[in-house]
Image (spheres, rainbow, N blue to C red):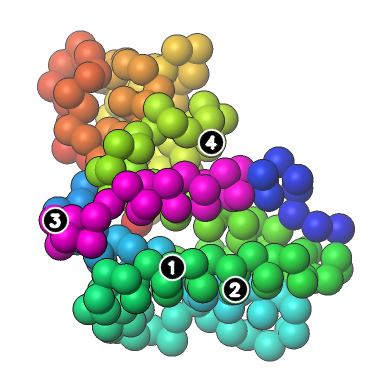
Amino acid sequence: MTAPQETLDRWADGERLFATALGRLTDEEFDRPSLCPGWDRRHVVAHVVRNADALGNLLTWARTGEETPMYPSREAREAGITETAALEAARLRTEHVAAAARFADAVRGLPGAAWSATVRTMQGREVPASEVPWMRCVEVVVHAVDLDAGVGFADVAEEVQAAICEQVLGAWARRGETPDVVVFAGDREWGSGAVAVSGPLPAVTGWLTGRSRGEELTADGDLPELPRWL
């Protein structure tokens, strides 16, 4: 057994998309705001670096059977991002390449039987190790958009966008925070609320993930304030 090839392909595409966005930034632009609330671009890059190793921990867990959480604690996660974000831009770029390579090595080196092992996400959700490459895909795709470097959700495969939308809605449902909306994007439909919201899939994905205010969307009422995604 291994992770589905489609998932592996989507993850690889996501890594390339993030590298493309990062490559478009000058070193001086690292300190400018990103689309991720509260973070500048260097913090986005730092998070993507640290996330590679955190998800690598889950693959170590699957391979060894020894519980290896993504991060020791939320405080340790934040401290690691802050520390990495303080690096010079050139060093930060190097750290990104190295971390992405370490994660890729962990994926390639995971024995077949280990892909069915159960691991636990930062949010406490138990998932098979085969889901870990998809988790990385979501991180690099969304944060490629966050870098605001000419990469948008329109550059992402529709199937990936739709899966991200479903993941956001699933997170809200688990927390009992589903907004009172029904969302339409082409022939796709999510939710069953009182307010109908529609628009192109990239615009819907941007709105649901909190990366836009829904400027390209139409609604038969006021757009609601959406809960946080994660």
The stretch drawn in magenta includes residue 172: no
Measured in 3D between alpha carbons, the distance from the residue under mark 1 to the one under mark 3, in whole angstroms, is: 18 Å
**Amino acid type of the residue that numbered disc 4 sits on in the rendered structure:** Val
Which mark identifies residue 160?
A: 4
**Amino acid type of the residue that numbered disc 3 sits on in the rendered structure:** Arg
**Can you identify the residue that label 1 sits on?**
96
Instruction: Name the foreground residue: 185 vs 39.
Output: 39
Residue 230 appears left or right of 122: left
Above or below, 139 against 154 in this view is below
> Are the residues tagged 3 and 4 within 8 Å (C-beta)?
no
Instruction: Name the foreground residue: 178 vs 29.
Output: 29
> Considering the numbered disc 1 on the image, is that residue within a helix, a strand or a loop?
helix
Residue visible at 37% across and 47% down in the picture: 21
> Considering the numbered disc 2 on the image, is that residue within a helix, a strand or a loop?
helix
State which mark lies toward you, 4 or 1: 1
Q: Quadrant of the C terminus?
A: bottom left
Whether residue 222 appears in this view of the structure is yes
Residue visible at 52% across and 48% down in the picture: 16
**Can you identify the residue that label 3 sits on?**
32
Above or below, 17 against 179 in this view is below
State which mark lies toward you, 3 or 4: 3
Question: What span is in magenta?
Answer: 10-32
Residue visible at 75% across and 78% down in the picture: 63
* Coordinates of residue 69 in the picture (x, y in percent): 53, 80
> Are the residues tagged 4 and 1 within 8 Å (C-beta)?
no
First-in-chain label (1 vs 3): 3
**Can you identify the residue that label 2 sits on?**
102
* Coordinates of residue 72 in the picture (x, y in percent): 43, 86
Instruction: Name the quadrant containing residue 127.
Output: bottom right
**Amino acid type of the residue that numbered disc 2 sits on in the rendered structure:** Arg
* Coordinates of residue 227 in the picture (x, y in percent): 25, 46
* Coordinates of residue 162 in the picture (x, y in percent): 50, 31
